[in-house]
Amino acid sequence: MMNVDDILLSPHFHKNWDTRMGCDPSPEAVMAVIRSGIRVHSGRELRDLANQRFVMLAVYWHPDLDIVISVDTTMRPWRAISVLSRDSWRRRQERKIRKPKRRKHDKPGGRLRRKPTEKKWRFR
């Protein structure tokens, strides 16, 4: 089992936890949420053909608090990366409804299709 010292909190996690939960996070509280939560996805470290490191974050969901925590479990100590709540998801959905994504032909000067060009045939 992990110790309390086995998790670090990123600045992004600190900011989001304070915004979504209304209090300053402590490593003990975060580990308690992770232990009592449900693991949705386990973390993995992958390598591409050029031997570059790629990390898939572990995802934990706590149904009572209705939050999702992303954790980098490939590092020792673990590092909490992000926390999401239902309110942040709702705000994102409202933003999508209010401001739809602009398509290329909606932008000023944009065209849906390329302008046809004349083909110059060259005979030898």
Image (spheres, rainbow, N blue to C red):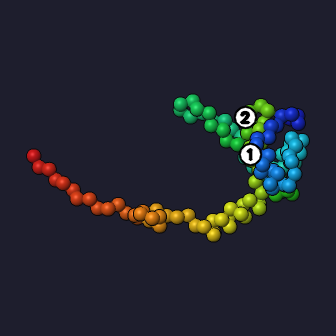
Q: Residues within 10 Å of mark 2 (few under 14, many from 20)?
A: some
Q: Quadrant of residue 56?
A: top right
59 vs 77: above or below: below
Please provide percent x and percent y for residue 83.
77, 50
Q: Quadrant of residue 110?
A: bottom left
Q: Find numbered disc 2 in the image and state the secondary structure of the residue it sits on.
A: loop
Q: Earlier in the sequence, mark 1 or mark 2?
A: 1
| Residue at the outermost front position | 108
| Left or right for 121, reference 99 | left
Name the residue that disc number 1 marks: 12
Q: Quadrant of residue 10?
A: top right
Nearest the camera: 44 or 66?
66
- Residue lying at 18% horizontally and 54% vertically, measured from the top left: 120
- Residue lying at 58% horizontally and 32% vertically, measured from the top left: 52
Name the residue that disc number 2 marks: 74
109 vs 75: above or below: below
From the image, state whether disc 1 or disc 2 is nearer to you: 1
- Tag 1: amino acid: His
